[in-house]
Image: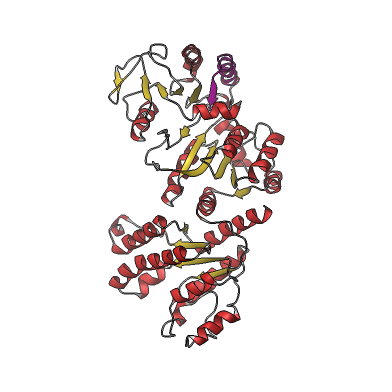
Amino acid sequence: MSIMDLEAILHPRSVAVVGASTNTASWGYSYIHHLIEYGFRGNIYPVHPNYTEVLGIKAYPSIRSIPDTVDFVISCVNAREVPQMVRECGEKGVKGIHLYTARFSETGHKDAADMEQEILRLARSKGIRIIGPNCMGVYHPKVGLSFGYNLPKEPGFLGMSSQTGGGASGFVLLAGLRGVRFSKVISYGNALDFNECDYLDYFVQDDETKVIVQYIEGVKDGRRYFETLKRATAVKPVIVIKGGRGKSGARMTSSHTASLAGSFSAWEAAIKQAGAVSARDFDELIDLAVSFYFLPPLRGNRVGVFAGGGGPSVIAAESCEEAGLEVIPLPQDMRDEMKARGVSIWDWVGNPVDSSIIGGSGMTDMDMMHLMAKHPDFDLLIATINDWVMMTLSTDERFRLSVPAGAQAYLSVKERYTKPFLVAVGERGVTAEQYDDFHWKALAEARSILLKGGLPIYPTIERAARAARKVIDYYKKL
C-alpha cells in the first residue's frame, strides 16, 4: 500500500548516497552534509568508487559492498547509471530510492522517457518505491533528512508535496522565517511512481501533519485527485498552488517535470468545489500557510483595524473591504464604555482606529485594542507596526524603544484574549549601507517578539486581509 510504503521510506534507519562527492559544489556532497548537519541518527553510507571517505564517513565503491542493511538510497548519479543502481538496490533489499537524477521524460526525448519507464519496471520487480526522478526529495527535520541548507531544524505540523524542488526549498526557507515549521516536505518531480494523490493520502492520515500544501504542475489521474482532495479538505486544510496556468507556464511545466497543464479555469472551479484553498503565487502561498498554521478557525469577517495615522488607516480599511472583510463601526455599548471612562473622543474615534486623534483623549491605541479584543462584534483584529510613518515622525530613541515595545504590547493582547490577531510588519528594502542602522534592527527585534509569541506576521495589511478571507471561506464551507 502506498501509505505504508511512504511511511517506511520517510523513517529510514540507514541512508546511502550514491554519487557521493568531496566536491562542495555537488549534490553528492550536499546530501551527505545535510544528513550530518540535520542530525540523522541512522547509518550514513557514501557510495563512490573513487573515494574512501566523504566528510569523515567511510565510503563504499557500490551499494553491494555496504556490509549492512540499506533502507533508503539518494541517487546523484547520471541517468544512464540508474538502471544498474536499481538492480543493486534490489539485491540489497532497499525500500525506497530518491532520484535526484534528472534528464528523463522532462527532456521530451523518447529514449529518455523509455529509460524512465524501464527504471520503474525494474524497481517494481524488486519491490522498491521511487520518489522522483528529477526532484530534491525529502525534508523531514524530525528524523534528520533535508534537501537544503539553512532550513529550520525544529519539526512542526505543516506538510507539503511539491513538483518543484527549488520552489519547495524556497517556500520552506521563507515560511520558516515567518515561524512555520514542517512535518515533512516531499519534492517529487516527474512523479514516476508516487504521485500527488499518494502524497495527499499520506498527509491526511499522518498524525504529525495538520495543514497540507501542494504545488502541482499536472495530475496523473484527475478524477482520483479531486476525489482524494475532497476527502482531505474535510479533515485538514489543503492549500494548492498550480503551475502552468498560462501558455508560457504550460510550456515550462512540460520541460520542468513532463507535466501537461489543462484549463486553469476548470482547475480553479474543481479546487473550489473540493473545498481546498487556492494560492495564486508563492507570496500568497506563504501568507496562507502562516494563517492556517497560527490562527484558530475564523468564523466571521468583522474586523477591527489598527494602522497608525489617518491616511494609512483609510487605505488599510479599504484593503480589508476589498479583500472581503467587513470594517464595522464601533458598537454603541463600546462607545458608552469609553464615555463612562471619561474618554473625550468617545463619539469621534472609530474603526479603523486613527492614532493621530487618540493622543490626549484619556486612552491609548492599546486601550482600544483591548476593548475590541473582548467585544463579541469583532471576529478578528488586524494591526500594523507602521515603520515608515514612525520612522519619520518619532525621534531616534523613541523609535528604537517603541517598536519592540509595540510588538510586546500586541503579544499581551494575544495572550489575554482568544480573538484571532494578525500583524503587518513592514519589509522595506534595505541597502548594504543601511544594514546596521538601528531602525532595521528595531524592526527585526519586533518581528522576533511576535514570532516567539506565536502571532502571524505579514508584509502588509492587504496581504493579511486577503489571507484571512480565504481562511474564513475554508471554515465556512466546513
Which residue: 49% across, 20% down?
79
Say which quarter of the image contains residue 262: top right
Q: Quadrant of the N terminus?
A: top right
| Magenta highlight on residue 142 | no
Q: Is residue 88 left or right of residue 58?
A: right
Q: Is residue 372 left or right of residue 322?
A: left
List x then y, in percent, for residue 327. Answer: 59, 71
Q: How many marks do you count on the picture?
A: 0
Start and end of the magenta stretch? Answer: 113-131
Please tell me whether residue 143 is drawn above or below residue 177 in the rendered image.
Answer: above
List x then y, in percent, for residue 263. Answer: 69, 42
List x then y, in percent, for residue 149. Answer: 37, 38
Which residue: 35% across, 65% down?
404
In the depicted view, which residue is nearer to us: 27 or 343? Answer: 343
| Magenta highlight on residue 118 | yes
- Is residue 191 in view? no
